[in-house]
Image: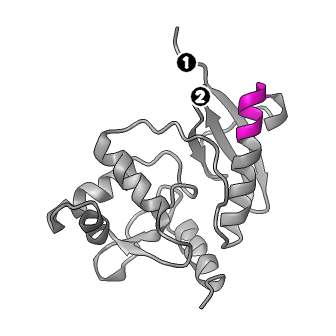
Amino acid sequence: MPATNHTAILPTPEGEFTAVFSDRGLAELHFPNSRHKATAPAGALPAAQRRWATLTARALVRVLAGRPAGELPPLDETGTAFQRAVWRALRAIPPGQTRSYAEIARILGRPPGAARAVGQACGANLIPVLTPCHRVLAAGGKLGGFSGGLEWKRRLLAREAAGKVG
């Protein structure tokens, strides 16, 4: 039997995000300006997904305010073993800090030439903001790309930098 996905609208001070939940957890997160739109509020979800939607919404509000995400719902990440390793490494980057694609490759024990593969894994991330690919920069500190657009990346990085302690 194929997995059933449920979509929900997650209101935030920055607009309505759309979350897609599988039977295993949060599978996708889409920005307010995305073409992916849910038609139901989180309250219309089955019980497990409703709890995950609450956790997702709280985490989103925290990150959008420049704070750590806190508790996340289970993540249903579909990708290769390398992509999943990159996504775990991204979640280990503290708010207010950034890493380069080459640094992530090094953290994973890969040669500097694997920076391009790290960038491709970031591009395949279906849970932006909570798996914070916005904290990864191109060589020389350039912004690089971002699924939500560079304005979102700038905004997220600025808020996290403003909230940085020490």
- The amino acid type, in three-letter code, at marker 1 is Ala
> Residue at (37%, 69%) from the top-left corner?
144
Crowding at dot 2, Cα within 10 Å, few <14 / some 14-19 / many 20+, comes out as some
Q: Position of residue 30 (x, y in %)?
A: 60, 47
- Please report contact status of discs 2 and 1: CB closer than 8 Å, yes or no: yes
Q: Residue 163 lies in what quarter of the image?
A: bottom right
Q: Which mark is residue 3?
A: 1
Q: Is residue 96 left or right of residue 106?
A: right
148 or 96: nearer the viewer: 96
Magenta-highlighted stretch: main secondary structure?
helix
Q: Which mark is residue 130?
A: none
Q: Position of residue 87 (x, y in %)?
A: 42, 53
> Residue at (44%, 75%) from the top-left corner?
98
In the picture of the structure, the residue carrying the numbered disc 2 is 22
Against 59, residue 99 (above or below) is below
Quarter of the figure with the C terminus: bottom right
In terms of secondary structure, where does tag 1 sit? loop
The residues colored magenta run 45-52
Q: Is residue 49 magenta?
A: yes
- The amino acid type, in three-letter code, at marker 2 is Ser
Pick out the residue farthest to the top: 1
C-alpha separation, residue under disc 2 versus residue under disc 1: 7 Å
